[in-house]
Image (cartoon, rainbow, N blue to C red):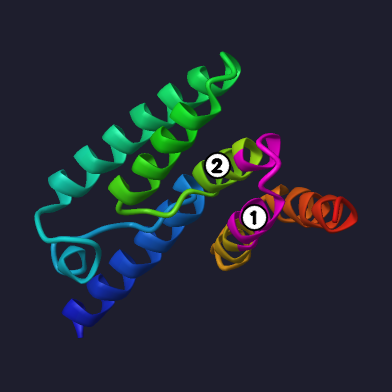
C-alpha cells in the first residue's frame, strides 16, 4: 500500500512539474518510445541543441536570410525530442514571407494541433487560429 501511495505522489508531482514546465516530463523508461534511443540526459542535450538551432534561425530570419532560417528551423524540429510550437510557428512565418502560403498553412495546422493537445494550454491557440484565418484570406 505504501508503494502505491508513493507512486501516486510521484505521478502527481510529475504532472505538476509538467504543467509548470509546459513540456512532457521524461523518464528513462519512456524515452526509447520517442525519437531514437538513449538516456534522459541525451534527450535534454538534444532539446538544448534544438533551442540553439532555433535561436540561430531567428537571427537568420531577422537578417532576411529566409532559406537558411527555414533550414535551421527544420533542423531544430527534427533534432528535438519534444515538439515546440515556437519552432513550427517561426517556420510557418518564413514560408509565409516567401509566399509559400500552402506550406505555411500546413505548418500552422501542425502547430495548432500541438498547442491544442498540450496539458497546459497557452494563448498560442488563438494566435495560430488567426494566422490560419489570414492565410485563408490570402488565397
Residue visible at 9% across and 56% down in the picture: 38
Question: Residue furthest toward the top?
Answer: 63
Q: Which mark is residue 16?
A: none
Majority secondary structure in the magenta region: helix
Q: Does the magenta run of residues contain 39? A: no
| 38 relative to 64 in the view: left or right | left
- The quadrant the N terminus occupies is bottom left
Residue visible at 49% across and 31% down in the picture: 67
Vertical comparison of 42 with 57: above or below: below
Residue named by callout 2 = 91
Residue named by callout 1 = 108
| 49 relative to 51 in the view: left or right | left
User: Mark 1 and mark 2: span between their CA atoms?
Assistant: 9 Å
Between disc 1 and disc 2, whose residue precedes? 2
Instruction: Tell me the crowding category of disc 1: few under 14, some 14 to 19, or many 20 or more residues within 10 angstroms, Cα based.
Output: many
Instruction: Tell me the crowding category of disc 2: few under 14, some 14 to 19, or many 20 or more residues within 10 angstroms, Cα based.
Output: many
Along the line of sight, which residue is nearer the eye, 37 or 138? 138
Do the residues under discs 1 and 2 have CB atoms within 8 angstroms?
Answer: no
Q: Look at the numbered disc 1 and give the secondary structure of its residue.
A: helix
Along the line of sight, which residue is nearer the eye, 127 or 66? 66
Vertical comparison of 95 with 16: above or below: above
- The quadrant the C terminus occupies is bottom right
Q: Does the magenta run of residues contain 106? A: yes
Vertical comparison of 60 with 67: above or below: above
Amino acid at each position: 500500500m505504501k508503494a502505491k501511495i508513493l507512486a501516486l505522489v510521484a505521478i502527481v508531482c510529475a504532472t505538476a512539474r509538467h504543467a509548470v514546465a509546459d513540456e512532457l516530463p521524461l523518464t528513462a523508461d519512456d524515452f526509447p518510445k520517442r525519437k531514437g534511443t538513449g538516456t534522459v540526459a541525451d534527450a535534454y542535450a538534444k532539446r538544448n541543441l534544438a533551442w540553439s538551432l532555433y535561436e540561430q534561425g531567428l537571427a537568420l530570419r531577422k537578417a532576411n536570410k529566409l532559406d537558411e532560417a527555414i533550414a535551421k528551423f527544420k533542423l531544430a524540429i527534427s533534432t528535438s525530442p519534444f515538439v515546440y510550437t515556437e519552432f513550427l510557428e517561426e517556420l510557418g512565418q518564413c514560408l509565409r514571407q516567401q509566399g509559400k502560403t500552402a506550406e505555411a498553412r500546413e505548418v500552422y495546422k501542425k502547430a495548432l494541433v500541438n498547442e491544442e493537445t498540450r496539458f497546459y494550454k497557452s494563448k498560442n491557440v488563438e494566435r495560430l487560429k488567426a494566422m490560419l484565418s489570414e492565410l485563408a484570406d490570402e488565397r
